[in-house]
Image (cartoon, rainbow, N blue to C red):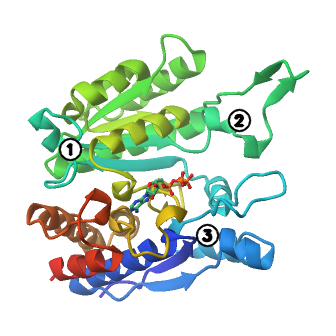
Amino acid sequence: MGERMRIALIRGDGIGVDVADAAVAVVDKAVAKAGLPPLSYDEIDAGAGYFRDRGRDIQPGGEERAGEADAIFLGAIGLPAVRHDDGTEIAPHLRLRDRFGLYAGVRPVRAYPNAPQRLADPRAAGIDLVILRESTEGLFYSAAAHGRSRVIDDRVADDTLRITRDTTEKLHHFGFRMAKRRKAKGKLGRLTCVDKANVFVSMAFFRKIFDEVAAQHSDVETGHAYVDAMALDLIRRPWEFDVMVMENMFGDILSDLAGGLVGGMGMAACAEIGDEVGLFQPAHGSAPDIMGQDKANPLAAVLSGAMMLDYLGEKTGQTALADAGEAIDTAVERGFAQNRLRPIEFGGDMGTKAMTRELIDLLG
Ligand code: ATP
């Protein structure tokens, strides 16, 4: 028996609540199956619904409690009808990203049998890659919420793309560690730096730091790609890529493109990791169009839960936690292969609850 892990749980709004419940149920089953002590959950109220009812977007002390947990799990936040006076949506999770310096945005993209395959080439069945998106700076340094843009006389608008050595070194080391761990699991284990170093000084700096860090990880195969060429290759030969590390805005765009190759938002798992804190959430939003109808595909949340267990295993050295995460990945793969997972999102007959029950079954 290992140490009991504490999870800060923010279920949020819309389908966030349903998919968070699904992820918790599946994670709990995998943890029990591995003979580990049950996770303890500290539920924190936050989101647009909470804001509508209470006039603030997260309960008092919620951010501090999130930081004290071993990991944070979040369903989804936001409702289009609930906004601040300036028209922006409720987004306490963006503050968590800033507050805890969650620079490493991890977005795995993987093809599963019997799930939609958007490319005709049969090799698309072998897509298994990770977009590693820097998540605290880049062009998002200037995101409207930070108030750093400059508008001159209603004629010119400037945004700033910022790359810092400190964050970029950490990001690249993270990428190399991930490539090595994937290699050990029999994957390609290759790291590609995606940038626009031929045009921008900031991007040449990003690449220079990549090459410096690469010299400390000489056992990992590396490559460079310009982001425009990468967009082309993600359509032409995505099965040849493994981990791809890039600036925030490039990652924002390419992770959606890559996600589209293997299905839809209901498969888009996501981890946001900093030096001390890791936050796990599906990359999709609260999907108000399907909320309360048991139609949401819980797999993005469930796979994010698997990443959380992997992270906790690495953080604490309890390999059984990482094994529990891997058991979830395997269950999803087997479930698709045996046609036992048929989400409504892909034209199937299984709602959130049926999918959850089947996943628990698949875990044995
Ligand atoms: P946000 O800006 O917060 O990402 P959004 O409304 O732009 O929110 P989503 O909430 O991700 O985007 O929804 C986009 C589309 O994808 C919607 O049509 C929604 O129904 C669908 N969708 C999102 N997540 C899922 C899911 N888990 N299962 C099924 N369909 C989903």
Residue 142, labelled with which disc? Answer: 2
Tag 1 residue: 117
- Disc 1 versus disc 2: nearer the observer: 1
Residue depicted at 27% across the width and 57% down the height: 346
| Earlier sequence position, callout 3 versus callout 2 | 3
Residue depicted at 21% across the width and 85% down the height: 33
Q: Quadrant of the C terminus?
A: bottom left
| Earlier sequence position, callout 1 versus callout 2 | 1
Res 66 quadrant in image: bottom right
Does residue 205 appear to the left or right of 117 in the view shown? Answer: right
Residue depicted at 72% across the width and 78% down the height: 59
Q: Which x, y percent locates residue 105?
A: 47, 48
Residue 285, labelled with which disc? Answer: none
Mark 2 belongs to which amino acid?
Ser
For the residues marked 3 and 2, what is the alpha-carbon distance in whole angstroms?
25 Å
Mark 3 Cβ inside 8 Å of ligand 1: no
The residue closer to the viewer here, 188 or 117, is 117
Question: Residue lying furthest right in this view?
Answer: 153
For the residues marked 1 and 2, what is the alpha-carbon distance in whole angstroms?
36 Å
- Disc 3 versus disc 2: nearer the observer: 2
Tag 3 residue: 67
In the displayed structure, 88 sits above or below 28; it is above
